[in-house]
Image (spheres, helix red, strand yellow):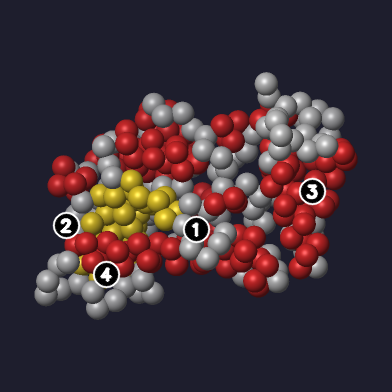
């Protein structure tokens, strides 16, 4: 396993490096390798950016992303969509994101990141030429055929302008999942506890996740699943064409052997009745 990154020559003299950090294993691994590889000058030009997904995000993710940045002495910024989160988008559009319309990524991530690039360009205030900003993403070829086809380095023409050139870099594109976890362990920063039960730290209930993972996530975040079910009823559209949130909740509650009951909160917010919170942590 390599303990450093290969930094392409065209990226070595950028004006700024934006390290996108979701708090997940891939972001953590890429950040650790960047800190081990980059020169002092590069690190001085680096900012870690977390795009906060609001209620769709697992508890503790922004704090973990901040901890990861602080471990390497890097500045940390958080940005969130100003006009609401995922459920607001779903209500406005009258449907859920799907494989052909993943609008959640555009509105909650891409557009928010582009606003940050504008802020950063203004801060840099480079005269006479566009600022060169490298934005690093922890996407890997092993995750999907679509990601396998993505180039490791590419100019983001949609985000670039006369004032800035945005180059997208996938620094761990060829890393295996095994190597990612080895790198995370080497960092010394514990991963998010959701990884004890799920393979990815995406939204709590992601339409692109498999059925089994959605059922597990619904057990871990039953209140969120119930909120999704209410919106499902409100707009008259199922969470997925082949699977409604009501069906996910039913399957989650039908399983007697629930390994994640300890993660459910107790207290005044605990539910009663057919969707009660059971096995609460003390």
Instruction: Label 3: state its secondary structure.
Output: helix
Q: Crowding near pointer 1: few (<14 within 10 Å), some, many (20+)?
A: some
Instruction: Label 4: state its secondary structure.
Output: strand
Residue 117 placement, left or right of 39: right
**Mark 1 or mark 2: which comes first in sequence?**
2
Q: At 33% from the left edge and 46% from the top edge, which residue is drawn? A: 76
Q: Crowding near pointer 4: few (<14 within 10 Å), some, many (20+)?
A: many
Q: At 79% from the left edge and 30% from the top edge, which residue is drawn? A: 278
Instruction: Label 2: state its secondary structure.
Output: loop
Q: Check whether the beta carbons of the residues at disc 4 and disc 1 lie within 8 A of each other.
A: no
Q: Measure how far apart labels 2 and 4 are at the Cα level.
A: 13 Å
**Is residue 132 at least partly visible in the picture?**
no
- Residue 124 in the image, given as x and y percentages of width and height: 19, 62
Q: Nearer the viewer, mark 1 or mark 3?
A: 3
**Mark 1 or mark 3: which comes first in sequence?**
1
Residue corresponding to mark 4: 165
Residue corresponding to mark 2: 13
Residue 252 placement, left or right of 169: right
Outermost top residue: 282
Residue closer to the observer: 20 or 155: 20
- Residue 55 in the image, given as x and y percentages of width and height: 59, 50
Q: Nearer the viewer, mark 2 or mark 3?
A: 3
Residue 228 placement, left or right of 193: right
Residue corresponding to mark 1: 147
Relative to 266, does residue 173 appear above or below in the rendering? below
**Mark 2 or mark 4: which comes first in sequence?**
2
Residue corresponding to mark 3: 248
């Amino acid at each position: 396993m390599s303990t450093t990154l290969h930094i392409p020559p065209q990226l070595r003299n950028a004006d700024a490096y934006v390290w996108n950090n979701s708090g997940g294993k891939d972001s953590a691994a890429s950040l650790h390798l960047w800190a081990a590889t980059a020169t002092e000058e590069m690190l001085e030009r680096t900012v870690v950016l977390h795009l906060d997904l609001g209620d769709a995000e697992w508890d503790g993710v922004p704090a973990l992303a901040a901890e990861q940045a602080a471990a390497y002495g890097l500045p940390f910024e958080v940005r969130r969509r100003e006009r609401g989160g995922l459920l607001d988008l779903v209500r406005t559009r009258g449907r859920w994101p799907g494989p052909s319309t993943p609008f959640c990524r555009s509105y909650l991530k891409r557009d928010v990141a582009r606003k940050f690039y504008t802020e950063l360009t203004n801060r840099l205030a480079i005269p006479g030429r566009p600022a060169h900003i490298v934005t690093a993403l922890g996407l890997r070829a092993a995750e999907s055929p679509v990601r396998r086809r993505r180039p490791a380095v590419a100019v983001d023409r949609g985000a670039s302008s006369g004032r800035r050139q945005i180059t997208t870099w996938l620094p761990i594109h060829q890393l295996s999942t095994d190597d990612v976890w080895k790198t995370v362990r080497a960092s010394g920063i514990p991963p998010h506890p959701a990884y004890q039960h799920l393979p990815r730290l995406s939204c709590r209930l992601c339409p692109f996740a498999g059925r089994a993972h959605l059922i597990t996530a619904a057990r871990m975040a039953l209140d969120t699943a119930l909120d999704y079910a209410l919106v499902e009823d409100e707009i008259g559209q199922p969470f997925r064409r082949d699977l409604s949130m009501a069906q996910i909740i039913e399957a989650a509650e039908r399983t007697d052997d629930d390994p994640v009951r300890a993660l459910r909160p107790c207290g005044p917010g605990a539910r009663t009745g057919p969707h009660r919170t059971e096995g609460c942590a003390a």
